[in-house]
Image (spheres, rainbow, N blue to C red):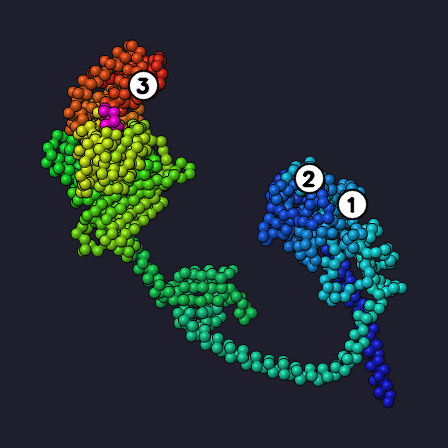
Amino acid sequence: MNIVLFAILSLLLVLGGVLYWGGQRILQQEEEKLRTDFTVLAGYIHAHETVLQGLYAQGLNPDGRRLVASTRVSETAGFERASWAFYDGQHAIAAMPFSLLCQSPDACPVAGGVFTGIGDYLSDFYATRWAASVYPAAPLFVISPSQQLSMSVPAIATMSGYEPLTRQTFLAVVDAVQRAGGASDPEDRSDSEGPSVLWVRDKHLPDAMVGMLPVMLPLNARGAEPATRRNVYAVSLLSRGRVSISERIRQMPLFDRFWLVRQGGEVLLGEGAPPVMGPGFHFGRDGLLLRIADKSGQWTGYYQLAYSGFFRANMWLPAAVLLMLGLGLAAGCGYLFWYNRRVIHPAETAHLDMVESEEFNRTVLDTAPVALCVLSRLEGRIVFGNALAAQWLDIGVGEQLRDSAETNKLLRQVLGASGPGTLETFRTHDGRTLFVAFAPTRYKKQDVVLCAFADISARAEMEQTLAQAKQQADRANEAKSTFLATMSHEIRTPLYGVLGTLEVLSLTPLNEAQRRHVDRIQDSSVILQQLISDILDITKIESGQLALQREGFDPRELVENCIASYAGVAERKGLVIYSGIDTATPAWVMGDGGRIRQILNNLVNNAIKFTDSGHVVARLRADALEGGRARLHFQVVDSGVGIREQDQACLFEPFYQIDGGSHLVRGAGIGLSICARLAALMGTAIQVTSEPGLGSSFSIAIELDLAEAPPGPSPRLHGLRVYVRSARRALSVNLCEWLEHWGAQASVAPASLSPVEAGERVLLDVQIGGDAAAPIEWDGPVVVAGGQDEAGTALHRADRHYLNSIGFALERWASGDAAVATRQAAAPHYAPLNLRILVAEDNPINQVTMRDQLQQLGCEVTLAPDGAEALAQWNIGPFDAVLTDVNMPRMNGYELASALRAQGVAVPIIGVTANALKDEEARCRAAGMSSWLVKPLKLSLLWSELRAQRAGSAEAGPPPSAPEAAAASAAASIAGACAAGAPPLVGKYREVFLQTMNEDLARLERALAAANVRDLKAVLHRMRGGFGAVQAMALYQQAEAAEARLGAGKRLSDPARGQVAALADALRAMLAAL
């Protein structure tokens, strides 16, 4: 019995001790909970102050405009004060919305639904600051009592934290700030680090307090200046309930009453005065009391826990002690059983699994196709290695790698590595090439490096083979380029002799049969030259030496010249070939006209080549773009055999031919490839549309800059009524558009014409080779547009390929004036250059060709067989320019140019070479040459280059006077035309022209003496037509300017008299020269 009593007493003592310890523990836990609550509250207050001080720091920037942005806002209806307005705004979908309160309609910065202020910045600031905080976000306000503007983030009714901001809370905060803002001076709350936050309480905000700090923020765009940013407060609303996380989780309060007192005795939270007591727990009349202060001593919290609530919450303690006493015995027995089953037995099983796993891992490592080894970082010895590592490296565990240069390099890189790495190649003692991957790690309580070796001997051998193949390909490509450049030079040199001689021959009087033979030889030579140029273009493209030029050209003339040049070939096949050009085509653009012409020529040539019957049409359309640019659409359409869809994908590949066995005509297969690459250089591509048996369409759109066109006459057809007749309606419609563009009233001629209209209209009859129009009865006037050989032989004939030729023919008919400008296909004529040229050329044929060409241009030529002889010739007599071949014996062209420049020679030196690659120009320029030309040379290119060099030469003489210049130009034009094969107008009407000009000069002088403006205008108009007919453009422009100077007046002014007199002097000088 005593034993039982002792046991009961012992149990009671144990239970009493447990109860006492449990009670103390409960008090400690309650104190810890309350201290945690207060610490969280103090931290939350500090977080609010940090946010407000962050806004204060932003307001210190004197430039407030960077904070202002425009945001679309919407007004919230149903506000109880009619003069106030609420707006909600959000500058992005993911941004925090804000609310704006305007208490005065006049001061509200909202216009047209857009608020210009710091709404965007405030939303971003709120999201950034509170996102980085561990505390829940609280509403942030910026309030200006003086401006009667207030903002909040988040917006009203937006969920932030556990409760949304309400309109009543917003207004209560505004009222609290307005009351507190006027009652305190911001300077009184400043310290060394800036103004401190003022905390106030408001009766309308229970269990909450308002923190406010004056800031210099611009609420709107008008407040961006520092002087206007006064009386603005950053305000934060601290709600006690936002940090009472444990209360919300437990759904019961931690305490019954709470007071928050700021240093100085001001109570900010809680009703009434807090109890007076010291720190720690105290037993009061109504319950337990606890006083807690933060580390700074600025904030003090008072907690009161009612006894009833305390005991009700902790009744579990005695019951738990009794329950634990009963369960302790059962738990002890159960624990032994559980420990044996859950710890001892699983540990034994895990040990067996670990042994099996290690054996399996060793098997995997030994059978892996990669050599694995572990090196000690301290000694470099092998700590572990699989079978493949022992075989490849010829080592065992505890040994070191074989001593060699490769091994030392491997050990230096591997043992000193601070992280994973690789070694591309490592050669073993038996010549094997390995790839090494390594990584530092720990193994058996020491620092080691794990290395993995992969055999890449086959790959290394393959890479070496590929490198050798690349070297061979590079050498072959270099040999190919050298071969092409050499062949270009060797072929172009005799080809220059052929083409140059033919061009000079074509300028001499020939009969019809001879002319056909010469034309045929020229066509074949041009095809050969184009083939050589295409091959060189491929070489240039492959070597990156092909560059586009930028020069002005007329796109309409480019298309017309292309069609005119291929018209003879097409018509001999019985094809209809013509062009259709949009009237909106610009007169002058900037670009590489030569390369565009090359593309168009190739497309037209292919269309003719693969079309046996039907037509070939070239079209040009223009779209205006912004910035002074235009998009030109070139299109070539044919009715040929067409192209299959599977062939279209390979059409632009080099040397590709479409089923060569099925066509009678074949080509080299490089033209379209070059065209595609040229189009790519221009930033565009060639589009193909084709079906077998229906023909093909090739089109390209190129964007070019617009430019000012050179001055020149254009047809004037105002009031003229024209019928247009051709075998193709599309051609007739296009001609009507152009005639209307020049002022005429044009329409397509109907199938049956009324005899009444014969006296009212002129019929433009376009005769297309290979497709004659049906006969028509027409008694009225007719202007015939035929081929190039027919144009200009009669007053009312024109070249159908050139729009200007047709327009001027109609103008000649309308005015009855044979002197109206016309576009002829006669042999070109060049104004004499009157230059003394020193030519250095070693090829005898090219010597004669170049001499004949230069003499044709009115130059005096001195020949030298090499550079040394040319240098000696230079010292004998003066010369105006030097033309030199670059490759000659004794002294080449580069050395000649350098020697002449070393002597101070400043005249133009032009290099002539058969090498068309781009780097040739750099070599010529480096040697001191003014420019370079590529053989074969055309007369037009040679004349243009010499004239340009003469104009830019520093040794050029003073320019002649205006009358002398005009006379010289006109005389040279006519004389050159006569010498060049007598075109029909000049050769046949030379005497008529001279007689007419002498008569007109006499009439001009009589009208000038009588000051008769009407007669002067008539004579000038007549003379202007004559000047245009012989291409005396200087006198043409001078007559046109004099006619414009006379104007519509009836009196002769002194400037007009002087201009007419100057024209008379120039005409008199020209007639004397002829």
Report the front residue among 732 and 859. 732
Image position of 697 (left or right of 154) = left
Q: Residue at x 19, y 32 (%)?
A: 779
Residue 394: image tag: none
Q: Hey, what amino acid is under mark 2?
A: Ala
- Which disc is residue 1042 wearing? 3
Q: Nearer the viewer, mark 3 or mark 1?
A: 3
**Secondary structure state at the residue bearing disc 1:** helix
Report which residue position mark 2 lands on: 107
Q: Which residue is mark 1?
A: 180
Does the segment drawn in magenta span residue 419? no
Q: CA distance from mark 1 to mark 2?
A: 22 Å
Residue at (74, 81) in percent of width and height: 328
Q: Is residue 464 above or below residue 387?
A: above
Q: Residue at x 56, y 69 (%)?
A: 445
Image quadrant holding the C terminus, namely top left
Dot 2 falls on a residue whose secondary structure is helix
Rounded to the nearest angstrom, the CA distance separating label 2 from label 3 is 70 Å
Q: Position of residue 542 (x, y in %)?
A: 30, 48
